[in-house]
Image (spheres, rainbow, N blue to C red):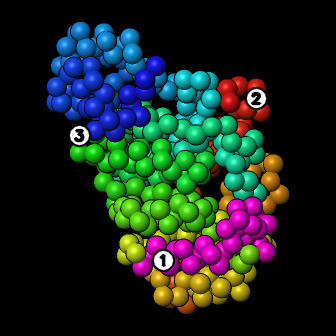
Amino acid sequence: MIDLKSMTLPELTEFLGELGEPAFRGKQVFSWLSRGAESFGEMANIPLTLRRRLEELCVLTPPEVARKQVSARDGTIKYLWELGDGNCVESVLMRYRHGNTVCISSQVGCCMGCFFCASTIAGKVRDLTPGEMLDQVLFTQKDSGAPVSNIVLMGIGEPMDNLDNVLKFLETVNHPDGMNIGMRHISLSTCGVISGINRLAELGLQLTLSVSLHAPDSPTRSRLMPINRAYGVEALFAACHAYFKKTGRRISFEYAMIDGVNDHDWQADLIAKRLKGMPGHVNLIPLNDVEERPFKPSRRTAAFQKRLESHGVTATVRRSLGGDIDAACGQLRRKTQKEGNPQ
């Protein structure tokens, strides 16, 4: 069966043209898909004969809410979505004064092996399709009733490990006949896949690139993030400098504060040294406790921030949302797996 929602508008228009349909039908169907249509019967301005033909050839597989948790503290909503094949992924709706942000997953599981993250404990199962990424945005919006204005690809999975599908998703969600969410309202996170950073630099998309740094020195970063053994931190910063030179876009560096591991003054000094000549923003993240991991939240976050700022580095501490609902990446899926429920 054909997955229409994973098609870009040109691909959809070409497919319908092969069925003998005029070009404007592509825009009509694309619009319905981008509104979260759950059946072809909902597409009221599409001829009945075409709707029946699409039902024969194509599939719509809206995700089911396997689990939903709402924070009593701040209204954050954590969704565990069950996909058409029974696998599950997470999305998080976060409410800010400037609008609502949804954090989505790009893979079922993750193969990157970061030692402080729950997403990677059971490994990677498969990539998500562009349509499955789009559905996380659409159905989070539909279920919550909260219009989504911003997207972050920081959920389960490494987006650069599924970059072709991610790029198709970005084209679809950004399209004016679709959800029309501007690239400047989208952040894409990577743990440091340099080939993906280089490809994004060539494309020149106006999104925000977020790099999961977590340590500026190779011994510590290799301990925390196995990818550092393939793409060393020195090469990573070189790629980031090249990205900025090519695009002019400031990079955000994500930094989970881990007690006694990456929170020393000399590491703040090294970050500042590596950022020299490139405007970067360091986002300090209070570590979420993961039952299977030995790391604990740092007690030096404020001091680390002050040390960075003393070098002229812009550093903020991420506001903690959804701490009472397992909102950190992979926690809810992991808990559900341990209970013997969907993957």
| Spatial CA span between label 3 and label 1 | 33 Å
Q: Residues within 10 Å of mark 1 (few under 14, many from 20)?
A: some
Q: Where is 26 relative to 292, above or below?
A: above
Viewer-proximal residue among 248 and 290 = 248
Q: Which residue is mark 3?
A: 177
Q: Where is 149 relative to 268, above or below?
A: above
Viewer-proximal residue among 301 and 164 = 164
Three-letter code for the amino acid on which mark 3 is drawn: Asp
The stretch in magenta equals 219-245
> What mark, if any, has residue 242 been given in the picture?
1
Q: Tell me if label 3 and label 1 are in contact, CB under 8 Å.
A: no
Q: Which residue is mark 2?
A: 339
Three-letter code for the amino acid on which mark 2 is drawn: Glu
Q: Nearer the viewer, mark 3 or mark 1?
A: 1
Please tell me whether mark 2 sits on a helix, a strand or a loop: loop
Residue 174: % across, % down: 32, 48
